[in-house]
Image (cartoon, helix red, strand yellow):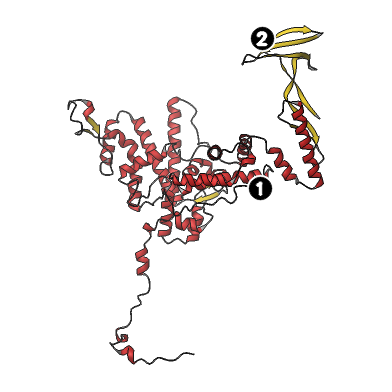
Amino acid sequence: MVYRKAYTMPIPAGAEVSEEDGRRIARWRLRNGKSRSAEIVDCKDGRIRVRGQSRNYMARYRNGQGDVVEVATGCRDLVAARAKLSQLERQAELIRAGVMTAAEGDAAEHVHQPLSKHLDAYEKHLRAKGSNARRISMVHRRIERIAADCRFTRINRLSAEPVERWLLEQADSGMAAATRNSYRESVVCFGNWCRRTHRLTENPFRDLPRADQNADRRHQRRALTEDELVRLLHIARFRPLAEYGRETIANSDDQTRNPKSRATWTRRLLTIDNIDEAVERARSAMSDNPDLMDELIRKGKERYLIYKTLVLTGLRKGELASITLGQFEIDASHAYLILYAKDEKNRQGSTIPLRADLASELADWIKEFLASRQSEARRRRAAIPASIPPSEPLLNVPDGLTRIFDRDLAAAGIPKRDARNRVVDVHALRVTFCSHLCAAGVPLRTAQAAMRHSKPELTANIYTDPHLLDIAGAINALPALTLPQGDTLAPGDDESIPLRATS
């Protein structure tokens, strides 16, 4: 049968109530100015509401599995709704007769829904799966962009050929291979989900070709040398305080202003050579404000510990930001960090061992943090905490760490890009961790486990910087292969050596 679904709702505000043929009728106007009327009824719970009917028809029928189901026809016309019901009943007969599979029947039911509804359902699936909110938003944007550019409005319009042409156009416009592969991955995963949920009988994107990322690497990172690491950590440790002790110098570039004007003076840039002097000037200038000076010193030490922890553990920035005090174990024979599966990229969960000096510095940092909390409580005359809650972050990784890192690089005299256009960013500290492991002679399988990689090729080819490897020393370690002096052949001796015939 086809029918319009009845419903009740509260009487709209400002509705006029009248009585016609013994029935109470409510009339009101919608926001668009159109008038509506409905009968007023008394509900069982004593409330007074208006009763209406849906504008579109519903269809009730027995599906291919024999179950009675109700579906929306999307039709306002009765004849069109009955035609839709006939189509659904015919489809059910084909499934019961074995001509059509149940999966094909389910896919046929989803054909007429707009693609946006399927994307919303896919987003809910990703949230239930435990995916990161940022990644869900990124995947949604990618699929929406491809759907808009390829004019995919309904799920039955999905096809690989338009997407393949779109990827080729993006390659011609300069999009990197890694970015194109990320778009491909998003639509392929969406197609797999549509197949599993019987929205499609097969994934139309399963054969989309992948771009060669090795031949088109746009963002190649390099590892920092030991000397660069020392300079970077020194800058990170003292730059927050040194910013308040920068020397004021005249700006010789501006010749149009009065030399006595403040606009002709500027602050000298911090470098590895003058940062210690700037720190001393800051200490002298802030002698009457010890609280601010202590805060800047703590900020510098925390930034120093963030960089050092990233370099000595290989953690990603987001992974380090997720670790709390309760995930720092120092009472064991070897100190380690516990990384939960929900915070790890591969969603497996890991135990990150810590070197003794780093573990000791982190423990001292926690003690200093507790002492500062207690001092603040005494100043405010509040309850003095005996410990820090385990839910507190181990290190407060700032949201703008990328920008801060770039400024620290400039102060340390480390170029952002080298002559080969390789870049140094926060994630390059993970590359540094892996490269120094391999340079120290650590076996590849051990380095792979430390990096938490699924494949050794990723550890050896992507995260290892050959520049740090002692290739010349390895070549010099090969056998000498020098012939003894007496075994050299005199000129013409090779002609007198008889050749032995071989069978």
Instruction: Give the CA distance from mark 2 to mark 1.
Output: 53 Å
375, 465: nearer the viewer: 465
Name which residue lies at 27% across and 35% down: 246
Q: Does the rendering let one see residue 329?
A: no
In the rendered structure, which amino acid carries the disc numbered 1? Glu
Q: What number is the disc on residue 14?
A: 2
Badge 2 element = loop
In the displayed structure image, the side of residue 201 where residue 351 appears, left or right? left
Name which residue lies at 78% across and 26% down: 3
The percent position of residue 259, horizontal first and vertical second, equals 17, 27
Callout 2 environment at 10 Å: few (<14), some (14 to 19), or many (20+)? few
Name which residue lies at 46% across and 90% down: 502
The percent position of residue 307, horizontal first and vertical second, equals 41, 45
The percent position of residue 399, horizontal first and vertical second, equals 44, 36
Residue 261 vertical placement versus 428 (above, below): above
Residue identifier under label 1: 202
Of the two numbered discs 2 and 1 on the same chain, state the one appearing first in sequence.
2
243, 128: nearer the viewer: 128
Name which residue lies at 33% across and 92% down: 496
In the displayed structure image, the side of residue 55 where residue 164 appears, left or right? left
Q: Nearer the viewer, mark 2 or mark 1?
A: 1
The percent position of residue 260, horizontal first and vertical second, equals 18, 26
- Are the residues tagged 2 and 1 within 8 Å (C-beta)? no
In the displayed structure image, the side of residue 395 where residue 275 appears, left or right? left
Q: What number is the disc on residue 437?
A: none
In the rendered structure, which amino acid carries the disc numbered 2? Gly
Callout 1 environment at 10 Å: few (<14), some (14 to 19), or many (20+)? some
Badge 1 element = loop
